[in-house]
Image (spheres, rainbow, N blue to C red):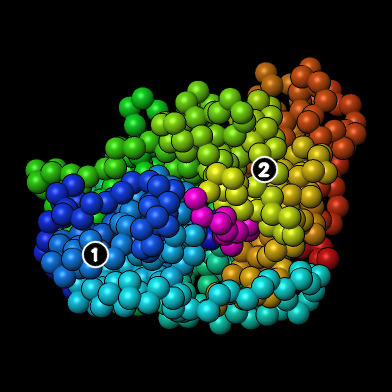
Amino acid sequence: MRALVVALLALALSVGAPSVRSSPEDSPIAWGRDLSAGLAQARDQNKPVLLYLEAVWCHWCHVMDQRTYGDAQVQAAVEAGYVPVRLDQDAHPDLSTRYRRWGWPATIILDGDGNDLAKRQGFVAAEEFAALLNRIAADPVAEDASAPEPSKPPLANDELSQRLQANHVRSHDGARGGLKSAQKYVDRDTVEWDLVLAGSGDEDAAARARRTLSNALALLDPAWGGFYQYSTHRDWEHPHFEKRTELQADYIRIYTLGWAELGDPAYLDAAKATAAYARRFLAAEGGGYYPSQDADLRPGEHADDYFALGDKERLALGIPRVAPQIFARETAAMVEALATLAEYSGDRQALNEADAAGRWLLRERRMAAGGYAHGSDADQRLHLDVQLRVARAFLALYRATSQRAWLAEAVSVATQFNRLRATDAGYYSIPPDQSALPPVRDLAAQISLARFASLLAHYSGDTAHRQIASHALNWLRRPDVAFSSFTEPGILLALGEAERDPLHVTIVGPRDEALSARLYAAGAQLPGWYKRLEWWDRAEGPLPNPDVAYPPSRKPAAFVCTERRCSVPLRSPRALAEFLAENAQSGP
């Protein structure tokens, strides 16, 4: 089957973009850069905290810097009544996860104990913002009622799945593809669920996936490759030009899976064009990947005319800023994407790049206490998003290379999830003792973790990994969680994968045999993310999970198990394909 972290893209106001230049370093507002210190100061001074979460690639952050925080009334309100803290959300995964639906920019007003008093999404005009600041300063009471207590997790049942499926179908834009929303983008779990259904013969689901993937190609930069952030006006023709590295990685992965299932060469071309863009603009010379490229050639000035130009014309004017940091989360996302592209298409360059970036993670971001650090500074906090991205990257490298060291490292990273375990259900985005605010459980992360842990359990044979998936699913099954948004097909993916075995393909044969390599490549190209693909050279000792006793064979052979049955030894790629076709036609 297929997978992908629902990462809802940042919503922005779809009004005309003013031409401005931003200069946050010159702001008269005395921004703090430490939330814990800001909260302590707020308690001492009996003031709320104004938390401004920005993204360096975000056009509307530039606009808000100039037009809102540059306004004298706003500045006076901040100085008189607030402790201002400004943070780059890319550098703080716990906060970006917590407030992702409120940005970017995200404006959060907190009391000294870290309780939310007010939240605002995207650009807020100066007059409205000054009124909000003055009102909260005068009466620091939360605007919204506190969230209800979570209900006890119900058992998974048909009603839950049927409701989720009904929401999934109802949310699809039958004319344009994508979701019925003001912003157009590829919601990757939505498409992946349709690809899973398509693989089982659902023609309507296949049509939904094709409609979305084909129409979303309008967001692919024709000059440089790479996907723009999203389009406004409920169509695909009004793009916002940010290019986040995580987004590029997720699009490489979903277009690769779409090509593998649906066979449209345009999807593979899009994945390769995006990989080429990342290679040219986002790959750091010393290893790792930068987190984003700005939407604007000049901060605050909308860049429609610039992005209408070709390569040479753009270069003559300059290149939009690439954020200079190198983060583990974004690097790991690219590793998984490139390894996935290599697995399904045989792209050797993508595999070499994935391998190099994976080794960079091992060398530069592995912490002595276990797990992976997000940045290169002294911040050694354990972020769920980072560990999950890294673990998925290493599992993808194992599938693409069959090198056991990558699987061992994925298993090692998985041991860190227990440090993030909530007592009742689910996993926190950061350990409580490392967070300035009470930790939260993020929906997209629970889905991705449940799916990863379910698949890892089959590779490792470790029941602890099944327990991780089960604990995440216990939270996802709660109605207040499962139906917190108008569609959440990622839960359907997670539930389905937890309840059945993946497609299991094992190549038994020496590594120096050409037929072994051809069989492994054929297994790698089989559609669907939810599969267990391994190469067993008996000289290397037992497989990591030796749960199948394969018969001795003088020649290399493929052994395949589906939900319905397992194969006899298959001694050619054609025989492997014929077995799967026969199994698909035989019915449940």
Q: CA distance from mark 2 to mark 1?
A: 41 Å
Indicate the secondary structure of the residue bearing disc 2.
Answer: helix
| Residue extending farthest left | 316
The residue range painted magenta reads: 436-448
Seen in the picture, residue 26 relative to 573 is either above or below; the reply is below
Residue closer to the observer: 41 or 304:
41
Query: Local crowd at mark 2 within 10 Å, few (<14), some, or many (≥20)?
Result: some
Quadrant assignment for the C terminus: bottom right
Quarter of the picture containing the N terminus is bottom right
Q: Which element carries disc 1, helix, strand or loop?
A: helix
Q: Does 447 appear in magenta? A: yes
Q: Quadrant of residue 445?
A: bottom right
Q: From the viewer's perspective, is residue 277 above or below residue 197?
A: above
Task: Report the residue at 86% width, 52% height from top.
Answer: 565
| Residue at horizontal 55 percent and vertical 67 percent from the top | 190
Instruction: Examine the rendering and report whether any part of residue 378 can be seen.
Output: yes
Residue bearing mark 2: 419
In magenta segment, residue 474: no
Q: x, y (%) of residue 550?
A: 88, 33
State whether residue 337 is above or below residue 48: above
- The type of residue carrying mark 2 is Arg
At label 1, the amino acid type is Ala
Q: Residues within 10 Å of mark 1 (few under 14, many from 20)?
A: few
| Coordinates of residue 7 in the picture (x, y in percent) | 49, 59
- Where does label 1 land, which residue? 80
Residue at left offset 78%, top offset 31%: 544
